[in-house]
Image: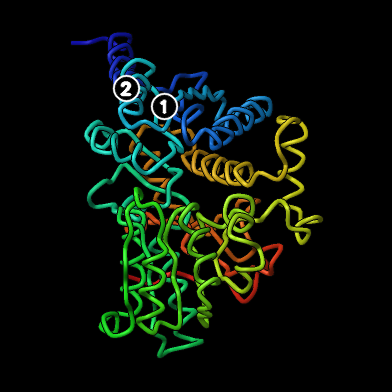
Amino acid sequence: MLNRRQLLAASAASLAVPAIARAQDTPGVTATEIRIGNTMPYSGPASAYGVIGRSHEAFFRMVNEQGGIAGRKINFITYDDGYSPPKTVEQTRRLIEQDRVAFLFNTLGTPTNSAIVRYVNQRKVPHIFLSTGADKWGHYQETPWTIGWQPSYRTEAQIYMKHLLEQRPNAKIGLLFQNDDFGKDYVIGVRDVLGARYDQMVRAVSHEVTDPTVDSQVVSLQNAGCDVMVTATTPKFAAQTIRRVHDVGWRPAFHYLTNVSISVGTVMEPAGPEKGVGIITSAYLKDPTDPAWDNDAGMNEWRDFMRRYIPNGDMKDGSYPFAFGIAQTLMHTLKQCEGNFSRESIMRQVASLKDFIPATLIPGIKVNTSPTNFHPIRQMQLQRWTGSTWQRFGNVIEGANV
C-alpha cells in the first residue's frame, strides 16, 4: 500500500502532467512572452504598406512598456516578403517552423496570403486579421484558422447596391471590373443584392491588368444606355475611367468607386479633380486629414501614440490609423483569452468579438465575429467627392446577409 507521502507525491505528479502538456501544446507562448509572426512588403511594389508593420512594432513596444498581456511581453517578429508569394511562403515557414510563433497576425496582401492559407490551415496556426479585403477570408468552413478584418470587397459592393436601390430602383448599371479575384468579389456583391434582377439591370465588362487603357470598356457601357456606373478596379484604371467618363460627356446619375482607388494623389488628381465631382465611395476608418476628427477622442489617442512612438511618421498616411485599429482589435482578443493562449483558445476568442470599437473606426461601425461570421467589419459610411476632398454623408450601412 502507498503511505500518505507516496500518495501526495503521486497526486502531485499526476497534476503536473497536464501542465507540461499544456506548455508543449502552446507554441510561441512561455511564462514570459508571446511570439507573434508577421510578413509585410518592406520592399518591392507594395512597400508603401510597410508602415503598417512598423506601426505594429511600435504598438507592441507600447504594450510591453505598459506591462504586456497576462504577465507576458509580446515578441513581434516581422519579415519582409517584398509582396512576392514565394517569398511569403518562405518567410511564413520560417516563422512557424523555426521561430515557432503562436500565430500569424495581419499578414498583408491577397496573392501573398493566398499562397500560405492552405499551409497554415493544415498546421492549424491562427492566421488572423489579415490586411486584405478579399471576401474568401470569411469562408470559415473552408479555412477555419484564417480571418480578415477590414470590410470585404463583396460587402462594399453590397452597400453600394443597397444605397442605389433606395435612390434609383430601376437603374441600368454599368459595372467595370478587373478580371481577377478582386474585381470578381464586386460582381458577386452586386449580384447578392440584385438577385434575380441582376441580368436585367447590369451590363458588366471586364479588363485585364495588362490592358493599356479601359477607354473602350467605358464607351461600351455608355453606348449600352447605362445611367449608373460602378468602377471596381485598381488606381491606374480608376483614374482613366473617371477621366474618360467625363471626357466623352457621359453623366451617370451615380458613379460608385471602389474604396481601394480613392487616393487623392494617385487617382483623383491624375484624373482631374473636377472630373470626379459627385463620385461616391465608402469608408470605415476615420481619415486623419479630415478636420471633423480634430477633436475626436479616438483620433487623439492615436495621435498621442504617434507622437510618442512614431514621431517621424506621416500623420496624413491612412495606413497608420488602420494599423492602430487592427492592433487594438488583437489586444482586445488576447485579453478575452484570459491567459489561455493555446491556438484553439485564440481562435475561439477571435470568433467571439462583440461590438468592439477600435479608436480609429467611424462612429457606428463595430467589430463583430461569431463561429459563423468571419467578416469582422460589415459596415461602412458613404462619402462623396467634392472636387477637393471626400465628404461623408448619410448613415452607416451594413452589408447584405448572404
Instruction: Single out the residue that lies furthest toward the left.
Output: 1
Q: Earlier in the sequence, mark 2 or mark 1?
A: 1
Q: Position of residue 210 (x, y in %)?
A: 34, 48
What type is the residue that disc 2 sits on? Glu
Label 1 secondary element: loop
Q: Nearer the viewer, residue 232 or 37?
A: 232
Label 2 secondary element: helix
Marks 2 & 1, CB-CB < 8 Å contact: yes
Q: Quadrant of residue 362?
A: bottom right
What type is the residue that disc 1 sits on? Asp
Q: Position of residue 141 (x, y in %)?
A: 24, 52
Instruction: Single out the residue that lies furthest toward the right.
Output: 295
Q: Position of residue 166 (x, y in %)?
A: 49, 86
Q: Which residue is mark 1?
A: 81
Residue 357 visible somewhere in the drawing: no
Q: Is residue 89 left or right of residue 162?
A: left
Give above or below for 15 relative to 364.
above
Q: Which residue is mark 2?
A: 90
Query: Mark 1, residues whose alpha carbon is within 10 Å: few (<14), some, or many (≥20)?
Result: many
Q: Quadrant of residue 262?
A: bottom right
Residue depicted at 25% across the width and 31% down the height: 123
